[in-house]
Image: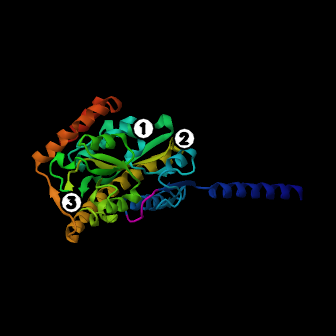
Amino acid sequence: MFKFTAKALACALSLSIAGMAQAADPITIKFAHVVAEHTPKGQGALLFKKLVDERMDGKVTVQVYPNSSLFGDGKEMEALLLGDVQIIAPSLAKFEHYTKQIQIFDLPFLFNDINAVDRFQQSPEGKALLTSMESKGITGLGYWHNGMKQLSANKKLVEPKDARGLKFRVQASAVLDEQFKALRAAPRKMSFAEVYQGLQTGVVNGAENPYSNIYSQKMHEVQKFITETDHGVLDYMVITNTKFWEGLPEDVRSELTAILAEVTIEVNKQAEALNQKDKQRIIDAGTTEIVTLTPEQREEWREAMRPVWKKFEGEIGADLIKAAEAANQAN
């Protein structure tokens, strides 16, 4: 009787352990962001979840929280560092408190177009920026595009002097402040949600945004002119908590890296397509004149803002700026 019972218990225990191993809790990744699901970033988060579900055999589960539903714009970085969320994708302008080198993406007229931005981000120097904040607990996983920025205003902007005295909305960025001061214009920090009303009431006279932001927020309804400057890039960095990332099993981390690389290509493709589509929608709306600069006129704007490069060269690094400039030449 005893032998039978011991054998049965051993068998039951063996089955129980096997069952527990099979039912081990998956690794949970909370991916929080502050934009709508139909945007390229929103779609990217959903595609990441979909591919993880399809390829990782239940080892990892991804929960997506769009529209600031988990943490708002001002709290998401703190939440990541505390481990309350595992992946976020803030605007590059949000990182100047963690590394001054990231300010390179705010330098005006540094990149000729989105393809130059791509080349720099894929270069050794661009990739090195992804790991430049690990001492602060932040690991970059990739760059997602929103698009090249255009200047909008209620005054036609053709030459740099046309911007003098105008009030432009900016993100909280020291470089963007200096960008408009170089034009003898007045930068005004304002949350993105307040921009439409600010433009409508005249609290600010102009702004800088990709076409997709201008259209989605209806800014073209309260701005008479958009000058196609392509003067800067509005991108995101997909980041994770370094301790969390390094604590993942090697095979899991490797597969997640491969999935994110695939998603990044799709997000960036969508972002460019959306900007072109929304540019046409703005043209079709007929409320706003789009001003196209000649190469000579664009160069005049570039020269007017070039002193900003020099001002931040010490913080960013002359070699890094040189590497970014080199990305303007296609291989």
Q: Where the C terminus falls, by quadrant? A: top left
Instruction: Mark 1 and mark 3 in contact? Answer it, CB < 8 Å.
Output: no
Determine whether, in the image, residue 197 is placed left or right of residue 113: right
Which residue in the protein does label 3 denote? 225
Q: Main secondary structure of the magenta part?
A: loop
Which of the 4 quarters of the picture holds residue 15?
bottom right
Q: Residue 121, position in %: x, y? A: 31, 43
Q: Inspect the image, locate mark 2, and give the three-letter code of the amino acid beneath it.
A: Lys
Q: Which mark is residue 292?
A: none
Determine whether, in the image, residue 245 is placed left or right of residue 184: right
Which of the 4 quarters of the picture holds residue 129?
top left
* Mark 1 or 3, nearer chain start: 1
Instruction: Select label 1 or label 3 by which is in front.
Output: 3
Query: How does the figure colour the protein chain or chains?
Result: rainbow
Instruction: Mark 2 and mark 1 in contact? Answer it, CB < 8 Å.
Output: no
Secondary structure at badge 1 equals loop
Which residue in the protein does label 2 denote? 243
Q: Give the class, few, some or many, for how many residues have Cα within 10 Å of label 2's Cα (few <14, many ≥20).
A: some
Secondary structure at badge 2 equals helix
| One can see residue 105 in this view | no
- Residue visible at 36% across and 40% down in the picture: 174
Q: In this picture, which residue range is highlighted in magenta?
A: 33-38
Q: Where the N terminus falls, by quadrant? A: bottom right
Determine whether, in the image, residue 16 is placed left or right of residue 117: right
Instruction: Give the CA separation, mark 2 to mark 3.
Output: 47 Å
Q: Inspect the image, locate mark 3, and give the three-letter code of the amino acid beneath it.
A: Phe
Q: Inspect the image, locate mark 1, and give the three-letter code of the amino acid beneath it.
A: Thr
Which residue in the protein does label 1 denote? 131
